[in-house]
Amino acid sequence: MKRLIALGSAILLFAIVAAWWTNSRQPKPIVLIPTLTGKPEYCLTCHSGLREISPSHPIKTFGCVICHGGEALALDKNLAHSTLRGGANPSDLSVVQENCGGSNCHSGTAADNNDHIQRVMKSVQSTYAGAIANILYTFGVEPDLTARFGIHAVTDDVITTTTGVPALQVFDPTKQTNPSVLKFAANCLNCHINAQPLPGSQFDRLTGCAACHTPLPNLGEGQGVRGQIHELTTAIPYTQCNTCHNRGNYDLRTMSFIQRTDQPTTRLQDYYQPIAQFTKCEYTLDCIDCHTRAEAMGDGDIHSSMKDIQYIQCQTCHGTPTQLPQTKTLTNPNDIAFRLAQLNPVVDLKLGDTILVTSKGEPLWNTRVLPDGTYQLVGKATGQVFTFRPVIGSGCTQNGLDQSSAYCHTCHSVQR
Amino acid sequence: MSDLSRRDFLKLTTTTLLTISGALGVGALFRFLDYQTEPPAKTEFDLGPAANYPIGSRSLVPDVPAFLIHSQNGFSALSLVCTHLGCTVEQKGGEFACPCHGSLYNADGKVLRGPAQKPLRALRVEVNSNGNLILHTD
């Protein structure tokens, strides 16, 4: 008995010494107590070199764990990372609600303009409903172009537009028999923000919110995987949009993706595919200078096609031969325009400023009506200042009813 | 040394091991029960002599963070923690602006622009027996 006690004591002593020794080898923790949670985190012990992710998410306020998960007090790498949500990308749509959601964050209400997650989950960027509906209709599986299937199932209880649909079921390729639809399912379900990107550095991007809002270091063609930087931004350059767009086309005969084969070296060549028609402003500006948050992230409805949500035309900023573009004078300090300008402060927007607005009332907050009746736009990604005129008085002879971009391109397209 | 029998040696070793591991065990137990990852956040700040803050002064106290006001009515203080998500607001002209999401408060802490809905929190200030200003954040 005594021998057992002695053996037990020796083991205990050894265990205590081993624990002390192990503990003494741990790095001294760097403690962060974020204002928002009030709970200590040791993440900075290893990650102190990371840049602040954005001015809207200062680490002193948010810390790391509220967005990433993980074991806040672990100093062992594997243990600390064992409960991360979404790995290195907490904005992946499979975990975005847990990481970025909340009524004060990104799953609030439409009235407060912070229902980003709800809108994105219903948008064509994540449902891919438009492509699926088109293929199912083209090959006779469905009777019309109304979307019934998406990458994920989603419902919409409050439809606010004429093109909104109430629900999508999950598109399940195993229930399809048409060979072309099966090929589509096998080869073409890559262009949505739930999917991993196609191979090749030109397609490098992340999933979820980060697909658009986390820029990738531009190392150029053939430089391999670009990696990821710890940044969220609303100053999104066209190159970020082009990680999905303008990188090729789907061939409906072979039901496969054909990459563009030219090797652009200038912005003019790179912006659009060689077949595209566009004007000077379309490639000198960045996509987000014209296209709005509702177009990119959805308007809260489920739509059957990109054309149901994409509505900005040349006339949004230039008007028509008979009408000036719509404008709005900012009189409400809580106007969403101020919040958007605050997030990307390329302009100092003030009460009383008159800006352009879209036909749906979205503010083009980076524009301003100048005293001489011309307009100014500041590039959201570049900070470049552009001035431009309305169509009225320009000598444009285009029929006022035919003012979609395709008509404008007839006279104003750029030759490459 | 030669007087120590094998039995006595084992007994002595056993007793020594038991004593050491018992002491360490008790020590470890106390440390475990008493363990705090971090001390609780400070809620009381000594701002030094009240005389350093004359009537009419408006002083930034970055460590809290707070804004101390000495008016004819006495001392008062505003927390500079934004009531939206907890970022530290910055003085901008006579107002306080949140650099994170753009909330704007007037000089009294009232919301001028969201997304914050509630005014900046008023903090308690008192002068202690030494004549020092004590700011409470709890």
Image: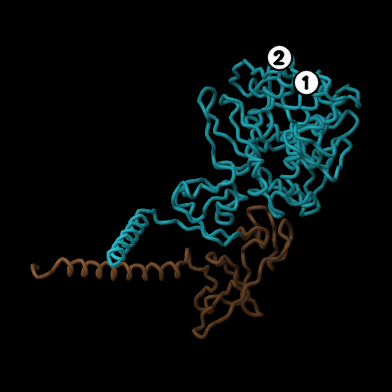
Chain colours: A cyan, B brown
Q: Quadrant of residue B23?
A: bottom left
**Gap between marks 1 and 2, in whole Å?**
34 Å
Q: Quadrant of residue A258?
A: top right
- Marks 1/2 same chain: yes
Between disc 1 and disc 2, the foreground one is: 2
Residue shown at the point (63%, 40%) measured from the top left: A92
Q: Which mark is residue A254?
A: 2
User: Which of marks 2 and 1 precedes in the sequence?
Assistant: 2
So how many labels did they put on this image? Answer: 2
Q: Is residue A78 left or right of residue A60?
A: left
**Is residue A369 visible to us here?**
no
State the quadrant of the N terminus of chain A. Answer: bottom left
Q: Which mark is residue A412?
A: 1
The image shows residue A175 at horizontal and vertical percentages of 76, 27
Q: Which three-letter amino acid code belongs to the residue tagged 2?
A: Thr
**Does dot 2 land on a helix, a strand or a loop?**
loop
The image shows residue A318 at horizontal and vertical percentages of 81, 31
